[in-house]
Amino acid sequence: MRNLFVLSVVFLFSVTSCKDENKSNPPNIIIIYADDLGYGDVSSYGLGTLNTPNIDKIANQGTRFTSGYSSSATCSPSRYALLTGTYPWRNKRAKILTGANLIIDTTEMTLPKMLKNSGYQTGIVGKWHLGLGDSKINYNQKISPGPNEVGFDHSFIMPDTQDRVPTVYIENGKVVNLDPKDPIEVSFEKNFEGQPTGKENPELLSMMWHHGHNGSIVNGVPRIGFMKGGTLAQWSDIDMADEFLNQAKKYISKVKDNPFFLFYTLQQPHVPRTPHPRFEGKSGMGPRGDAIIEADWCIGELYAHLEENKLLENTILILSSDNGPVLNDGYYDDAVEKIGDHTPSGGLRGGKYSLFEAGTRVPLITYWKGKIKPQVADETVSQIDFLNSIAALIGSQTRSKDGVDLSEVLFKNSGTGRSELVIEAQTKTAFRSQNWVLIPPYAGPEKSYYTNVELGNSENYQLFDLDTDQAQQNNLAKSQPEKLNQMIKRYQEIIGSKE
Ligand code: NG6
Ligand code: CA
């Protein structure tokens, strides 16, 4: 009995001191977030044929999750959920954005706000895609609200996507290199007189559009939407990866003496895929593969920067992707033709835009030198839990609406994952509970005509057992009526709590 008492005291003491250590000496947090990187695109997952040695190095020294999820099969909703810990289907505006206003309420709790309240400096470098401003955006003035109004002290962003105008960087609310004599005008309705477009001037293109993407031409690449002016401010597509990397390194060097959070949001391998020429041909799979090799190189450089600055011991790296992979997402860029034996979805069904697994099951890796032991974990974890888990780790009481505290499994090689998770794809939802996945009936094509991705739409309920059927080939809805009803009931209980 006495021994038990002593043991309990020792245990309590060690738990408390561990918590206190993270509170008194909080680790830096860096989330590296790729755009459209698939479950099979990272070589340490052992599923495809691409080589990503720098990501593998991190994965092999940290926890590599085999059931890590983004909250949505598209970008903006996933980013919304990651930053707010709230399911995107609760927010009607959390869908793919094009020139939209900010979809995070400035009074809402966010991951960077929570960290700021806990004494962190907070920065974002890379793709934003959560909207800007609260009325028609004027790019020639300070643009607000944006990242700086929802918790980031510093922001250097691409506003939406690389395929959308305006094709300029915005730093802390101001367009970088803007010449006031050459103001920027943007429209998603009609072209500005005299401006060439992808539709009317194919002779000016260095990359041909396949579907959509036939608006203004910038650097030979046709975009979504129309833009005029801002010539000096236009980004160089092939230098974007270097620009974001340098900005990320600069930010780290600036804030490194105090705890910091960096959201490093890569543009690769989203379209248009424009790797720097030094990566051209490196994958043998055309620009999509080369862009992933480029992203992998950037991650290696960032890691080296942390090492040089002796920051690795006290920095948690989290690496993931906002949604699953797609090959043809609107340009002729050889992604389909040169894919060879590579499987971006790693054998999962579907891809970007899909309710099937490949839409939201993505690479997810956590690394913390000397703290997280190398491990492959099969627990279900989701990006929606980052806010709560990081808060719990550093001793903050803040909790989000839909996240759970997975700090043990994400950062301590222990504990269990989520038992339930709702995933989203283009405003439709599906439900995972343990090894079971329920996809309710939805109208719409089974396959997207343009992207050739299986979307998960069906007249009937679909029920899959991932323990025996990772590829979701056997619909058990008819043969397992009890399980089906149990899943429907629970799914409706959760979805019914929509506000
Ligand atoms: C779609 C675009 C696609 C991509 C996507 C957003 C067309 C035809 N398709 O509307 O190319 O930009 O939006 O991708 O325009 S995401 O990863 O940011 O969600
Ligand atoms: Ca994306």
Image (cartoon, rainbow, N blue to C red):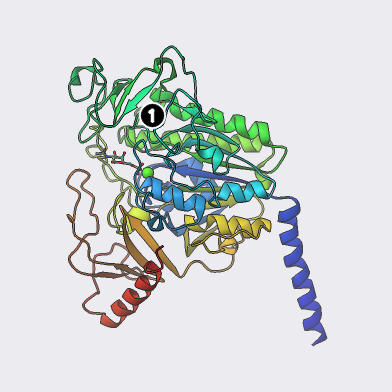
Residue at image mark 1:
275
Residue 493 lies, in percent from the top left, at: 38, 73
Residue 317 lies, in percent from the top left, at: 57, 47
Q: Residue furthest front?
A: 135
Q: Quadrant of residue 184?
A: top left
State the residue in front, 11 or 41.
Answer: 11
Residue 244 lies, in percent from the top left, at: 50, 31
Question: What is the count of numbered marks?
Answer: 1
Whether residue 159 is situated above or below residue 110 in the rendered picture: above
For image coordinates 35% across by 57% down, the residue present is 424
For image coordinates 25% across by 74% down, the residue present is 476
Q: Residues within 10 Å of mark 1 (few under 14, many from 20)?
A: many
For the question of whether residue 236 can be seen, the reply is yes
Q: Secondary structure at mark 1?
A: loop
Q: Quadrant of ligand 1?
A: top left
Residue 456 lies, in percent from the top left, at: 24, 59
Amino acid residing under circle 1: Pro
Q: Quadrant of residue 282?
A: top left
On-image quarter of the C terminus: bottom left
State the residue in front, 81 or 7.
Answer: 81
Please state if 40 lies on the left or on the right of 398 as rendered.
left
Whether residue 221 is situated above or below residue 71 in the rendered picture: above
For the question of whether residue 44 can be seen, the reply is no
Q: Is mark 1 within 8 Å of ligand 2?
A: no
